Image (spheres, helix red, strand yellow):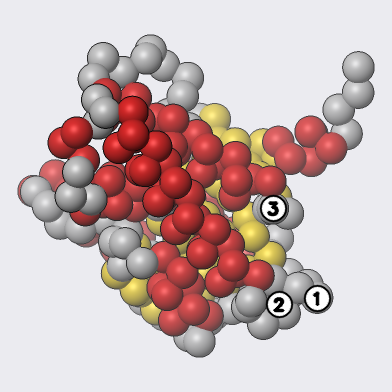
Amino acid sequence: MDTLNPVERPRLVLVLGGARSGKSTFAERLAVQSGRQVAYIATATASDEDMRDRIARHQAARSATWQTIEEPLHLAAAVERAAKLADVLILDCMTVWLSNWLFSQDQSEHMEDDTISAQHYAGALHEIDALLGAVAALEAGKTLVVVTNEVGLGIVPAYALGRVYRDILGLINQRIAAVSSRVYLMVAGLGVDIKRLHEHAEL
């Protein structure tokens, strides 16, 4: 497993995979192995009993010494705040953040309208650009580990909001992966550095 040792510039690591693939556990293990101070940016909100149980399990698994910032929407500001508290930041997760963001938009019920869909694409990606800008502006040696889902490997969603969600998350993952130093794909609890494989791929 790669470590998160300090480097000359801020570092971005992406951890993605399917449900129950071990994404959060892997990201947390990277943070622990770094031996540095850790801040955890949690995007989930306790909207129902199942989510409350999930949040409680995640909280119980984390070190009591970690700082936790609960922020369902404003990622760039959360990263800036977390960087004042720790050197390794975990953002868990982009999947939940996108759900929060889409449902915070006044026009989300009009997803059948192509113009409205385009506005959602642009708005969400603008938020991601702001997040990446905040990472680039961090002090040297800071690391952000972003956890996200790969949701594009199944069937095409039957409803418009599901299709827009899938497509936007795919674009978000691509945008973050493009500027990440490491991109780990989780399969059955095992992390494969697909960016390193990509860089060494030959025909």
Q: Residues within 10 Å of mark 2 (few under 14, many from 20)?
A: some
In this figure, which residue is indicated by the disc labeled 2? Answer: 141
User: At 21% from the left edge and 53% from the top edge, which residue is drawn?
Assistant: 104
The image quadrant that residue 62 belongs to is: bottom left
Mark 3 lies on a secondary structure that is loop
Callout 2 amino acid: Gly
Q: Earlier in the sequence, mark 3 or mark 1?
A: 1
Residue 46 image position (x, y, % from top left)? 15, 57
- State the CA–CA distance, disc 3 to disc 1: 15 Å
User: At 34% from the left edge and 34% from the top edge, which residue is drawn?
Assistant: 115
Callout 3 amino acid: Val
Between 103 and 198, the residue placed more toward the observer is: 103
Task: Identify the mark at residue 172; answer none if there is no mark.
Answer: none
- State the CA–CA distance, disc 3 to disc 2: 16 Å
* In contact (CB < 8 Å): disc 2 and disc 1: yes
Residue 29 image position (x, y, % from top left)? 54, 57
Q: Is residue 50 left or right of residue 6?
A: left
Residue 61 image position (x, y, % from top left)? 35, 60
Q: Is residue 101 left or right of residue 62?
A: left
Q: Is residue 172 visible?
A: yes
Up-down relation of residue 9 to residue 154 (above or below): below
Callout 1 amino acid: Glu
In this figure, which residue is indicated by the disc labeled 1? Answer: 8
Q: Earlier in the sequence, mark 3 or mark 2?
A: 2
Residue 191 image position (x, y, % from top left)? 61, 39
Q: Residues within 10 Å of mark 1 (few under 14, many from 20)?
A: few
In this figure, which residue is indicated by the disc labeled 3? Answer: 179
